[in-house]
Amino acid sequence: MNPKRFFIGRTIGLLVVLALVGIFFLIKPSTKTPDNTDKTGIQGYKDATYNIDGLSVKLVNGYAEDEAAPDSAEKIITKYFGNEAKGDLNGDGLEDVVFLLTQTSGGTGTFYYVVVATQIPVKSMGYIGTNAVLLGDRIAPQTTEIRDGKIIVNYADRGPSEPMSAKPTIGVSKYLIIENNRLVETQQ
C-alpha cells in the first residue's frame, strides 16, 4: 500500500466526516427548553416560583409538571393562563405583574389561581412569585386590572346549587392586595 495514497485518503475521509458533523450541528434543531430570561440572565415572571396550596411550583416558560404523589403516574400540570395586568403593587416603584395560572391533576377539574410576580428591587434582577389565590374550578375568566394598588379579577362562575357541567354565568369580582409580600383578598 502506498503511504502517500493512504495519507491522502485518510485526510479526505476526515474532512468529509468533519463537514458532515458541521452540517449536522447547523441544521439540528435546538433541544434547549426556551425560557423567559433575557440575554442578561434576568429571570422573567413566567420562570418564577409560586406557592400553590402550600407547595412551591417552579414555572419554566409558564409551565410546570410535578408528580401528584411519589412514584405516581398522575401529574399535576400548572400553566400560565394570561389575563395580565402590570403596575406597582408593593410600593417599590417597580412594575409588578399579576396574572392567572391554571392547574389540572388528571381529573375533570381545571383550577384557576391569581398570582403576582414582584420585581426584585436590586437593579431589576428578575421576579419573585407570591402565593396563589384560588378563583375556582372551570370558571370563565374575564379581565384582570390594577386600580390604586388593588388587583381586580373579574370572572364568571356558577351558583352554589348549579352542577359543574353548567356554563358559568354569574359575574364575580375578586379584590386583592399585596400585604407583607403575600397576596391577600380585600374588600372593594
Image: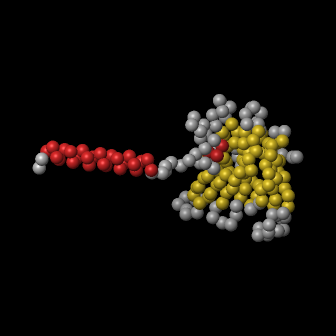
The residue furthest top is: 123
Q: Quadrant of residue 184?
A: top right
Q: How many marks?
A: 0
Tell me which residue sits at (76%, 70%) in the image.
165
Residue in the picture at 50% in, 48% down: 32
Q: Is residue 29 visible?
A: yes
Q: Residue at x 40, y 50 (%)?
A: 24
Q: Position of residue 14 (x, y in %)?
A: 27, 46
User: Residue 124: image x %, image y %?
Assistant: 66, 33
Is any atom of residue 114 visible in this view? no
The furthest residue to the right: 188
In-image side of 6 versus 161 (left or right): left
Pinpoint residue 139: horizontal percent, then vertical percent: 77, 60
Looking at the image, the residue that sits furthest to the left is 1
Residue at figure coordinates x 73%, y 56% from the top left: 112
Q: Position of residue 146 (x, y in %)?
A: 80, 43
- The answer to whether 74 appears left or right of 51 in the picture is left
Q: Is residue 122 above or below residue 62?
A: above
